[in-house]
Image: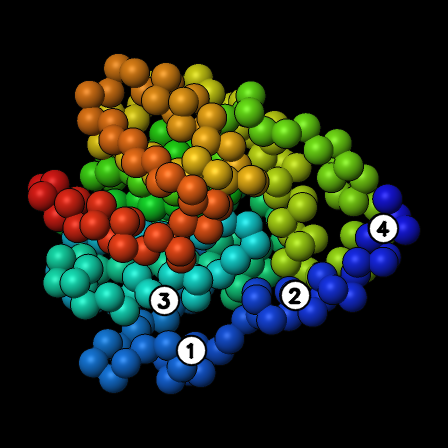
Amino acid sequence: MRRLIILILPALIFFASCRFSRISDTRAERKYFPEAIKPRFTFIYINHIRLHYVKTGSDTMPTIFIVHGSPGTWKRYRQYLTDTDLLKHFRIIAIDRPGFGYSNQGHAYHLDAQAKLIYAIVQQEQNGKPFHLMGHSLGGPVVVKLGQDHPEAYASLTILAGSISPYDEPAEHWRAIFVGDPLQYLMPEPFRTCNTEIWYFKKDLYQMDTCYNRLTMPVTFIHGDKDPFVTVKNVDYGTKKLAFNKHIKVIIIPGANHYIPYEHFDIIKKHLLTLSAIK
């Protein structure tokens, strides 16, 4: 295993530097946002931990709050942040999840700690209008935990290819080797953080398992039936845990893989626009 990591390390470094590199707010505004859309980049500090996020749209509108997967940053959702149809109905907020981007990059957090840090952003941005959570992949259990901790704060949850089931996660015992081994520091930083938090979450998901009764708001599951990383069985798990909730919606995308937020934007956009009816 050590030899394998050393052999693929150069490719990992190149991949991470291209795909998950940070970009300054000033450069991001020039590169990703048309003149008509003015992003507001924000840093806040919670218990000396720096958190970073971006928002577009009017602060008087309902909010779609986006939580990315692992690894990742807010910039994977620039298509949502700049979509004029969505911005007619919503303010869009996309965060750098704790441990990634400019939110204390390189430090992995357990699920409970992440939810507490992210809720501080939610509190800062609440404006008295409906607040909708959307999480992809490992961001899925994060929005579930946010909803369980403060169900009164959210109008809906949307879970995109979310890895929420503790029973359907692969064991992947090899991850533990690199959590405590100095070899982890040879890995690109986003992948090191990713590996550690995934290992944390495998146990943390069991703590969420008994708290689904708190999710009484509308919940939508969107998943590809050919997802090689997060099995579509997670949708079965979620719908069974929420059998009491009469506001469950399931969208299975035939042939889709794990990257549905980027490859099936139109389907997700169509769903998000329906949330404007929630008052």
- How would you rate the neighbour count of disc 1 (Cα within 10 Å): few for under 14, some for 14-19, many for 20 or more? some
Name the residue at 27% across, 59% down.
Answer: 92
Label 1 to label 3: alpha-carbon separation: 10 Å
Q: Nearer the viewer, mark 3 or mark 2?
A: 2
Label 1 with label 3: CB-CB less than 8 Å: no
Compared across the picture, whether 207 is left or right of 35 comes to: right
Q: Judge whether residue 50 can be spotted in this image.
A: no
* Disc 2, SS: helix
Among the two numbered marks 1 and 2 on one chain, the one whose residue lies closer to the N terminus? 2
Among the two numbered marks 4 and 1 on one chain, the one whose residue lies closer to the N terminus? 4
* Disc 4, SS: helix
The residue carrying mark 3 is 78
Looking at the image, residue 177 lies above or below residue 273: above
The location of residue 224, given as percent across then percent down, is: 42, 40
Among the two numbered marks 3 and 2 on one chain, the one whose residue lies closer to the N terminus? 2
Label 3 to label 2: alpha-carbon separation: 20 Å
Name the residue at 32% across, 77% down.
Answer: 33
Among the two numbered marks 2 and 4 on one chain, the one whose residue lies closer to the N terminus? 4
The residue carrying mark 1 is 28
